[in-house]
């Protein structure tokens, strides 16, 4: 399951989505998330799913690779689905004691599950189609106006990118630790919830030590390259908006307008 986490990973491909400016993709992701919370019915989700399917097809990222990331959060999706199904009042379909399933609850459960699935897939496309260095430059450019009020845009962008970049690394390290402990006879499957929680200690302690070691190696590497923040830094490749970015912006506006229009149906 740990290997199924795709958030923070980059999938190299030669597609129109990969060639877009990082700022366009960041803004597009924010617009997509905003659309998810504006949607009021299943027609809007159907439209957004079609739009997302088009983006995935253009990006040339394998569909199996994208949906593999859902297996890691399947428990969260299932918990959200069940919670909404039994916690919404309305016309009762089935009841057993204090538990009751309603028509409105089932509708809300599917509504929230679809929203969560689209949110995970849509946000994953940002890192799958954008190199970490491009993501850092894009975030810094977008946050640059905030430097007027003293916000360190470069440092914030760097921290966010490093956090995303090292998610797959830490997941791989966790997988190695689990396999090493299982080879020594550790059991993480049997027992009650307290026993399973106690069994995680031999995983968490080495993971924290490994995380600090990776952070120290990164700090030494940055220091060896004379990194001293964003002041005075130059770039080999300056990012610039192209015609495809303006076309993507028009598509964002049209998609947002279409989603709002579905709320009137």
Image (spheres, grey):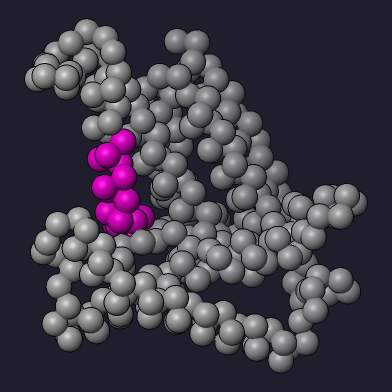
Q: Nearer the viewer, residue 14 or 186?
A: 186
Quadrant that contains the C terminus:
top left
Q: Nearer the viewer, residue 111 or 57?
A: 111
Quadrant that contains the N terminus:
bottom left
Q: Hey, which quadrant is residue 18 in on the image?
A: bottom right
Residue 100 point in image, percent of width and height: 17, 18
Q: Nearer the viewer, residue 185 or 13?
A: 185
Q: Is residue 235 left or right of residue 218?
A: right
- Over which residues does the magenta segment extend? 63-80
Residue 43 sits above or below residue 33 on the image: above
Residue 83 point in image, percent of width and height: 28, 31
The verdict on residue 212 being magenta is no
Residue at 58% of width from left, 87% of height from top? 217
Residue 93 point in image, percent of width and height: 14, 13
Q: Hey, which quadrant is residue 101 in on the image?
A: top left
Residue 185 sits above or below residue 113 on the image: below
Q: Give the overall secondary structure of the magenta segment.
A: helix
Residue 1 sits above or below residue 207 on the image: above
Residue at 12% of width from left, 61% of height from top? 191
Residue 13 appears in the figure:
no
Q: Nearer the viewer, residue 132 or 12?
A: 132
The image shows a total of numbered marks equal to 0
Residue at 55% of width from left, 65% of height from top? 163
Q: Is residue 216 left or right of residue 91?
A: right
The verdict on residue 71 being magenta is yes
Residue 186 appears in the figure:
yes
Residue 86 point in image, percent of width and height: 23, 24
**Outermost residue, bottom side:** 224
Residue at 51% of width from left, 85% of height from top? 213
């Amino acid at each position: 399951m740990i290997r199924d986490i795709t958030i923070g990973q980059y999938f190299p491909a030669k597609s129109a989505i990969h060639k877009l400016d990082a700022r366009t993709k960041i803004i597009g992701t924010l617009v997509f998330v905003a659309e998810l919370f504006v949607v009021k019915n299943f027609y809007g989700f159907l439209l957004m799913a079609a739009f997302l399917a088009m983006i995935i097809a253009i990006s040339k990222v394998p569909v199996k690779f994208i949906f593999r990331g859902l297996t890691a959060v399947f428990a969260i999706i299932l918990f959200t689905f069940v919670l909404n199904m039994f916690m919404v009042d309305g016309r009762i379909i089935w009841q057993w004691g204090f538990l009751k399933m309603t028509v409105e609850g089932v509708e809300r459960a599917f509504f929230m599950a679809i929203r969560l699935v689209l949110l995970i897939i849509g946000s994953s496309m940002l890192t799958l189609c954008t190199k970490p260095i491009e993501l850092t430059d894009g975030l810094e450019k977008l946050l640059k106006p905030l430097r007027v009020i003293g916000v360190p845009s470069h440092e914030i962008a760097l921290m966010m990118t490093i956090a995303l970049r090292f998610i797959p690394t830490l997941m791989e390290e966790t997988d190695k630790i689990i396999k090493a402990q299982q080879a020594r006879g550790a059991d993480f499957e049997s027992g009650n919830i307290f026993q399973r929680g106690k069994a995680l200690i031999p995983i968490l302690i080495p993971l924290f030590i490994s995380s600090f070691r990776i952070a120290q190696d990164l700090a030494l590497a940055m220091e060896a390259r004379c990194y001293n923040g964003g002041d005075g830094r130059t770039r080999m490749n300056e990012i610039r908006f192209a015609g495809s970015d303006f076309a993507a912006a028009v598509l964002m506006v049209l998609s947002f307008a279409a989603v709002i229009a579905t709320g009137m149906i």
